[in-house]
Amino acid sequence: MSRRPFLGPTLALAVLVCGFAAPTLAAPPTRNLLVEPGFEATRPGHSWMPVGWDTSSSSLPTVFFGRDTALSRAGRYAVSVANVSTLIPYWHNWSQTLVVGPEMWNKDVVFTAWTRSNGVQGRGYILVHAVRDTVGKMTRIWSVSRDSARARLGISPLEDPYVYLGAKRAYFSEPETDWVKRQVRVYVPPSTNLIIVRCGIFGTGQVFFDEASLTAETALPPAELPVGMNLLQDPGFEGDGNSWEYSLPPYEEVACERETTVVHSGKASVRLGGGLAATIKTRAGAVKVIDNRSLAGKRLRFTAWAKCDSLSTHAGLMLFATTHRQNEVPGPTPRLLTNSTPWTQLELEADVPDDTYMVWAWLEYQAPASGRVYFDDASLEILGPARSKGPSSSTKRAPARKSGSSKATTPP
């Protein structure tokens, strides 16, 4: 390119020597890397917070975090998060952060948790991030605030070097469930220094979590992706939306929702828009995060149909690549729509750098804004090998953005 998710084949190995099968050896059990994965022990000096875990901080009175014995799956305790308002979009979650080094590089981490939904209107989720975040790492080593660690390192807020190197989330939207096992797997690229796991909810209702596990395993080879085929799951938003990330700033009334009355084809589209006045306008939208190293060195075409209805800012497509050498590499300058437009097909072509770990495909608008934009019938396909070894594209490349601006992110 000149920046969700996600693919890993199951590997089976059979050995046949001189006409008979060689005996198989049981793999040694992998160690759970999480502190207090069953939420049993209480943090010293706190009445209920489990050791090793933290909760998201939104300052909203509409969210409740708890630890109780009523619905635990194993042991004495389970934890839960409950939310009763979506006026301000927020990914409320339990989290644990691990400082890691080269011993974890070039491995896969597998995050597993049991979940139980109670009246969910929205989406529960589990998530694992592989991150390069020097400030966050030193915050934990020095036991100081992020601002203090940044000051010690001589790093300004706008130059904060935070980069997602790997990300995989599993959403689930069933309103009511018994205990269900969820699992996600992510490759840990070199230079990763933090691994973060999260269990949370986006929307209203309550989700319980228990028996969490994070293990490091031999990395599976990335799945080979076909040329000329749409790589996006649910490209027309005909399903439940769980295969897309909804990335929204915490501004009142900003929305990203499945729409069934205004469509380009099929029965649904995605509608973005809204938000009250805010100091900073930033990117919001529906995102596909494809965590697959086999995209490196390929040329991609990203298309979607868009329709604006009195939109006061602009909307369009964006591509980014997460790379080893250049961190986040933006794709070409997009064609932007604004005001009111009929259904219009937008298109980008871009070369993916040969050291890419992830590709981000955005259907986005600048929030907050009055009016709305609809997207439908998206497609991301491999055209073949990259035409150049750098981040070139068929149109002028957008300038790189500093941290703290509207760079590509996934919600927590």
Image (cartoon, rainbow, N blue to C red):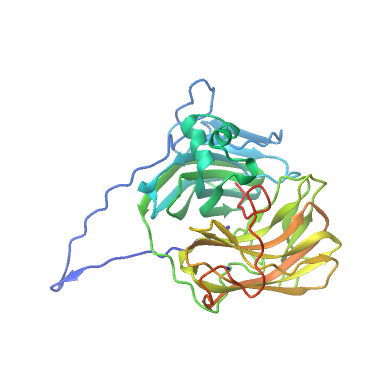
Pinpoint residue 185: horizontal percent, then vertical percent.
45, 55
Q: Is residue 288 above or below residue 74?
A: below
Q: Nearer the viewer, residue 375 or 239?
A: 375
Pinpoint residue 97: horizontal percent, then vertical percent.
49, 40
Question: In terms of image quadrants, where is residue 222?
Answer: bottom left
Q: Residue furthest left?
A: 18
Is residue 52 visible in the rendered image? The answer is: no
Q: Is residue 80 above or below residue 132?
A: above
Q: Is residue 95 above or below residue 378?
A: above
Residue visible at 53% across and 49% down in the picture: 127
Q: Nearer the viewer, residue 386 or 277?
A: 386
Residue visible at 48% across and 26% down in the picture: 42
Q: Residue furthest front?
A: 154
Residue visible at 50% across and 68% down in the picture: 295
Q: Quadrant of the N terminus?
A: bottom right
**Count of number-bearing discs:** 0
Pinpoint residue 55: horizontal percent, then vertical percent.
58, 35
- Is 398 on the left or on the right of 200, as rendered? right
Q: Residue furthest top?
A: 45
Is residue 8 visible in the rendered image? The answer is: yes
- Is 102 on the left or on the right of 235, as rendered? left
